[in-house]
Amino acid sequence: MISANYHTHTVRCKHAVGEEREYIEAAISEGFKILGFSDHTPQPYPEGFISGIRMDMTQLKDYTDTLVKLRDEYKDQIQILIGYEVEYTRKYFEPLLEELKKYPLDFIIQGQHYVEDEVEGFYVGSETDSEEKLKAYVDFTIEGMKTGLFTYLAHPDLINFTGADDIYYRHMKRLVEAAIVLNIPLEINIYGFVDRRWYPCDRFFKMAAGYNPRFVIGCDAHTPQIVRQPEHIEGFSEFLERNGITYGDNIIDIVKV
Ligand SMILES: [Zn+2]
Ligand SMILES: [Zn+2]
């Protein structure tokens, strides 16, 4: 049983369903004490570029207004935090932070879906056997981690590398080492697990557990039904066990925001 989930989306990202209230009530009934909303942040992309997987800049007010109201309404039952899942980019990160700071903001998590960004880069979830792309993902993700602004790294194993293990380990171990040095927890992603995606994967977590970084479990809820305790997810405890990951040992419950 974990106390907190920091990875929750809303319909504004165009690929999630349900009312905010349903996510909150699911969290309460599952026994969570803290529910962090971290919808895909909008990005100040060039005019004319519309992302299909995130809210627009103009929706920041509605997003935060809605959550502030609910935070108040539910304050005796659960602590609600207001955050975002943010892509680190070279071009848009600074101006984005300036915008986010104009509204209530408790935390941001890093979700590196693109390198270097959605406008000009590549999607890291596409299958690839390119060591160059793997290396670019790791280098760029570490660059983002070094900003010191992220509460944790979401789905560190989002890169869908289909090549040899030795190449995979050579680069991904650098990500783990950086997480330890920078004291950034690595997320074990429940949504990917339930949706039978390529992450969270044994190849990454077995290797990572050997270095003993801090892990955090994130629902990455795009539907209220995914706001679940990990032990209610079929096969998830076995996943942790076979990779040498244990509650209270290397899984942390509540992260500092
Ligand atoms: Zn999403
Ligand atoms: Zn997410």
Image: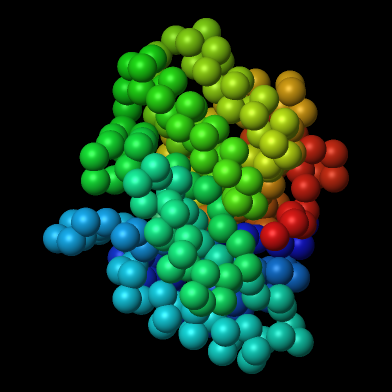
Instruction: Give left or right: position of 187 versus 231.
Output: left
Q: Position of residue 222 (x, y in %)?
A: 45, 62
Residue 92 at x, y percent in the picture: 36, 52
In this view, the residue in front, 188 or 231, is 188
Q: Residue furthest right?
A: 248
Question: 3 or 173, which is in the foreground?
Answer: 173
* Front residue (pair 186, 47): 47
Residue 106 vs residue 16: left or right? right
Q: Is residue 223 above or below residue 152?
A: below
Q: Quadrant of the N terminus?
A: bottom right
Does 136 sit left or right of 110 as displayed? left
> Residue shown at 55%/12% (left/top)?
170
Residue at screen point 36% across, 23% down? 133
Quadrant location of the C terminus in the rendered image: bottom right
Residue 241 visible here: no
Q: Position of residue 155 (x, y in %)?
A: 53, 42
The quadrant in which residue 228 appears is bottom right
Q: Is residue 245 above or below residue 119?
A: above
Residue 143 seen from this side: yes
Which color scheme did the rendering employ for the protein?
rainbow
Residue 162, relative to residue 89: is it above or below? above
Residue 137's place in the image compared with 234, above or below, is above
Which quarter of the figure has residue 74?
Answer: bottom right
Numbered label tally: 0
The residue that appears at 28% across and 36% down in the rendered structure is 121
- Rendering quarter of residue 129: top left
